């Protein structure tokens, strides 16, 4: 299909997700005001899909940016697609709505368009975002994902969220939800790390077969913050991307985004630099030829920038399996 900045994919529940979203995660050293300014700049250049999470600890600023752009007439609330995520300390069914309401309160919104289970594993509930013991090990908690999902369904039925999905789930964990007796609402999407070095072809094939939209984060590789192995290659310096960029008079970032979009995957592009924000949406005026798509396919090396090693000892750690 022809793609433009207003393109969307219709999800299994009938709601529509814009194909290009603006990611709001920022390293701790980035001032919160920079996040707010970034969201406002993104909306001004045409982004309508804003991806946030409780974990990012900047929902207040994201909400302020959205409401100010509504107040000045740039957008209407119904034109904004806002994603939130249930953090891993809110997995017990009785805490799910509480986790959602914390995000709604921070955002100062009446509803969230898409609410995801952020990760398929659970940590000890409480005030700490990442609860640790005295040895610096995470404190795991055991919750049946199916029970968490039923509480997510109740949030949708209550009208607090329009759509519900998951993030960072592997195939087995997705099937656990899909095969749940009495499933009322299936996950509309799975948000995963996906880029030219981790092209997720098997997960994409599986999700398409189940009418689940794949949403890609980390599409541009990564800012080199503390979670990232500094020895990993810088994706935007890849010679294949740079060479293809010359052909289309586009940056390697624009080529990386366009490649994912042409595979029917929703892209989250992240930057708080106004010039880069503008560039990241200028990906609808060209089309990668089949031979260029094939060349980029060849870059896959199943490499994660975010392997979440902190959680690797958790029984439900998702990345031990192939996909």
Image (tube, rainbow, N blue to C red):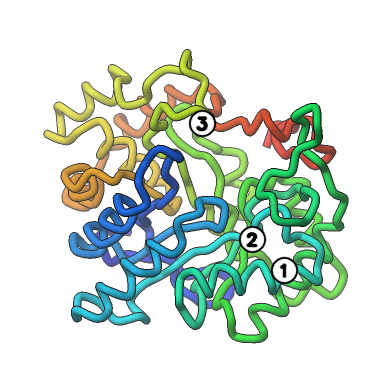
Between 319 and 175, which is closer to the camera in this rendering? 319
Give SS at disc 1.
helix
Question: Where in the figure is residue 10, as x and y percent of width and height?
Answer: 47, 70
Between 111 and 191, which is closer to the camera in this rendering? 111
User: How far apart are the two marked residues, 3 and 2, measured between alpha carbons?
Assistant: 25 Å
Q: How many marks?
A: 3
Question: Where in the figure is residue 18, as x and y percent of width and height?
Answer: 38, 64
Q: Quadrant of residue 170?
A: top right
Picture residue at 27% right of the left edge, 74% below the top: 68
Tell me if I can see residue 78 in this picture. Answer: yes
For label 2, the residue is 86
Picture residue at 58% right of the left edge, 60% below the top: 85
Relative to 212, residue 269 above or below: above
For label 1, the residue is 96
For label 3, the residue is 198
Q: Quadrant of residue 115?
A: bottom right
Tag 3 or tag 1, which sits nearer the N-term? 1
Q: Quadrant of residue 180?
A: bottom right
Relative to 156, residue 208 above or below: above
Between 30 and 48, which is closer to the camera in this rendering? 30
Q: Residue furthest front?
A: 134
Give SS at disc 2.
strand
User: How far apart are the two marked residues, 1 and 3, measured between alpha carbons?
Assistant: 31 Å
Left or right position of 250 against 199: left
Picture residue at 35% right of the left edge, 34% below the top: 293
Tag 2 or tag 3, which sits nearer the N-term? 2
Give SS at disc 3.
loop
Image quarter in which the C terminus is found:
top right
User: How far apart are the two marked residues, 1 and 2, measured between alpha carbons?
Assistant: 7 Å
Tell me if I can see residue 211 in this picture. Answer: no
**Labelled pair 1, 2 in contact (Cβ < 8 Å):** yes
Picture residue at 61% right of the left edge, 74% below the top: 101
């Amino acid at each position: 299909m022809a793609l433009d900045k207003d393109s969307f994919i219709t999800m299994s529940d009938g709601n529509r997700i814009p194909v290009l979203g603006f990611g709001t995660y920022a390293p701790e050293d980035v001032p919160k005001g920079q996040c707010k300014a970034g969201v406002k700049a993104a909306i001004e250049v045409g982004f309508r899909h804003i991806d946030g999470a409780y974990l990012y600890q900047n929902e207040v600023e994201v909400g302020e940016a959205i409401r100010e752009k509504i107040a000045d007439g740039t957008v209407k609330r119904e034109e904004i697609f806002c994603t939130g995520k249930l953090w891993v300390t809110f997995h017990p069914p009785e805490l799910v709505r509480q986790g959602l309401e914390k995000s709604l309160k921070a955002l100062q919104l009446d509803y969230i368009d898409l609410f995801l289970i952020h990760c398929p594993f659970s940590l000890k509930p409480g005030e700490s975002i990442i609860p640790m013991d005295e040895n610096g090990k995470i404190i795991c908690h055991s919750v049946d994902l199916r029970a968490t999902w039923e509480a997510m369904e109740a949030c949708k039925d209550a009208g607090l969220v329009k759509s519900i999905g998951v993030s960072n789930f592997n195939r087995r964990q997705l099937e656990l939800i899909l095969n749940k007796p009495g499933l009322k609402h299936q996950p509309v999407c799975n948000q995963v790390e996906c880029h030219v070095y981790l092209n997720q072809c098997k997960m994409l094939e599986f999700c398409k077969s189940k009418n689940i939209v794949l949403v890609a984060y980390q599409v541009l590789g990564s800012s080199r913050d503390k979670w990232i192995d500094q020895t990993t290659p810088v994706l935007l310096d890849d010679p294949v991307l740079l060479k293809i960029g010359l052909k289309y008079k586009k940056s390697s970032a624009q080529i990386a985004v366009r490649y994912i979009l042409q595979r029917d995957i929703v892209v989250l592009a992240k930057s708080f630099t106004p010039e880069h924000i503008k560039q990241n949406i200028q990906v609808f005026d060209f089309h990668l030829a089949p031979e260029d798509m094939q060349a980029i396919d060849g870059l896959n090396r199943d490499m994660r920038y975010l392997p979440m090693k902190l959680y690797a000892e958790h029984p439900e750690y998702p990345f031990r399996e192939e996909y």
